[in-house]
Image: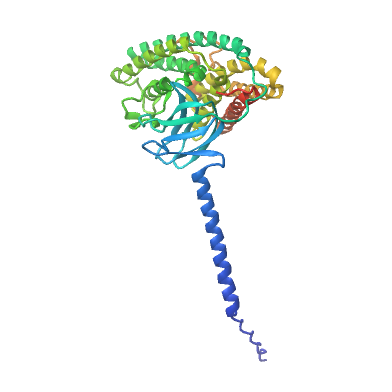
Amino acid sequence: MNAPHATPSPAPHAPSPRLLRLGLVASFVLMLIALGVFALSLRAVESGSDDGTLITISAKGCQPARVEVPAGERTFTIVNHSDRAIEWEVIDGVMVLAERENIAPGLRQPLRVDLAPGDYAMTCGLLSNPHGELRVTASGDAEPARALAAHDFVGALAELRVYTTLQMRKLERTSKALEQAIENGDLSAARAAYLQARRVDQRLAMPIGLFGDLDQRLNAPADYYAGREKDPDFGGFPRLALGLFGADTTTVDTTAELAPVAKRLVADLDTLSQRLAQASIPAAQLANGSARALQNWHDRAVDGELTPLALNDLIGLSEGSAKIVSLIDPLLASQAPSSQNQLDQALAALQQALAEATPPGADGSQSTAESAASDAPQALLAAGALPEATAQRLLADSEALAKALAAVNHALALSG
């Protein structure tokens, strides 16, 4: 039996010339729209926000090198066109008023700053780069109606001076113990002394951070130096940490390498002690300085493992922040109770997260803080890097506390 013949399908119609022309026009329009969106996005990257001032940092410094803005709250957008992470600071004499650290290559970061009229300096990437100039002119903006009087802060600032003095004495003692252990070539004692000294250093991160030159010598990471780890000016706690805790370290770096670094650290701390004894810390820097220190820790830790050294730093930062919160709380209670509640909750959350993340005995609660024979440093080091979930919680809670502290000046109508 023969199979039936299949009926051939009609051939598809070719698109008409008119439809082809319409398709080409539509494609061209879509391409123009895409190019326009791309151009606008590039322009946004280069110009910052509408009320912002763009500062581009290259390997050689800031562009522009001289900036003029009116007084009040201003936004600066920092764009990193160099090949390494950088920082940007606003400095009044030797005192740091605002900063943004760890801006990765190719990225930009906004920074909101409340500035009074005057002439300031800007740090511009590498510590060897020339400073930029920032002129802040008088503005017609009205002063906050509910600003507190200077005498409202007398008690808090007096208590802070006592706390700073006592902690500074601990820092000098533990740093001298660190210097001695390094001279003796005792790795275990040197590591213990380092962790103890560094923890106190971080308790004082707010007042230390106000003195840009000393803070850089004590705490600047290797990336901020032209020669990185090999740069002759690279020192302070980061250099000692590299020598004492480096991956291939089985003994302390040779005395010839680390002993001068420890000696210079002790000398810088002596200078710091003298400055703190003479300086008056601005009330506006109590919360702002603490917020910067916590945010800087977060920004450095967010891209890597949370190591025992980073955890030790955060413990010290939380202790220093707790002291600042205790000084600010009475003022917030009368001026902005809701802000006080947010700040207290943020601090409590970080403290709880740290309590759960820190190995038993590693917080020093069962041993003296200055004893080089304490079990706390060994317990901390033995724990290793924190689990990812724990690290993420600490990162989130530290940033939340930084933001709560950063909001205090607005709640108290403080500037400067």
Name the one closer to the observer, 173 or 271.
Answer: 271
Instruction: Describe residue 212's horizontal placement relative to residue 234 as left or right.
Output: right
Give residue 366's position: percent from left, percent from top: 55, 11
Name the one closer to the observer, 393 or 71.
Answer: 71
Q: How many marks?
A: 0
| Coloring applied to the structure | rainbow
Residue 102 visible, this orientation: yes
Q: Quadrant of residue 20?
A: bottom right
Outermost residue, left direction? 256
Residue 379 visible, this orientation: no
Name the one closer to the observer, 226 or 211.
Answer: 211
Give residue 316's position: percent from left, percent from top: 52, 19
Instruction: Describe residue 35's horizontal placement relative to residue 149 as left or right.
Output: left
- In the rendered view, tell whether residue 372 sits above or below residue 141: above
Q: Residue at x 59, y 10 (%)?
A: 154
Q: Quadrant of residue 147?
A: top right
Q: Quadrant of the N terminus?
A: bottom right
Q: Quadrant of residue 115?
A: top right
Give residue 322's position: percent from left, percent from top: 59, 17
- In the rendered view, tell whether residue 65 sits above or below residue 201: below
Give residue 309's position: percent from left, percent from top: 47, 24
Q: Quadrant of the C terminus?
A: top right
Instruction: Describe residue 7's horizontal placement relative to residue 377 as left or right.
Output: right
Name the one closer to the observer, 3 or 369.
Answer: 369
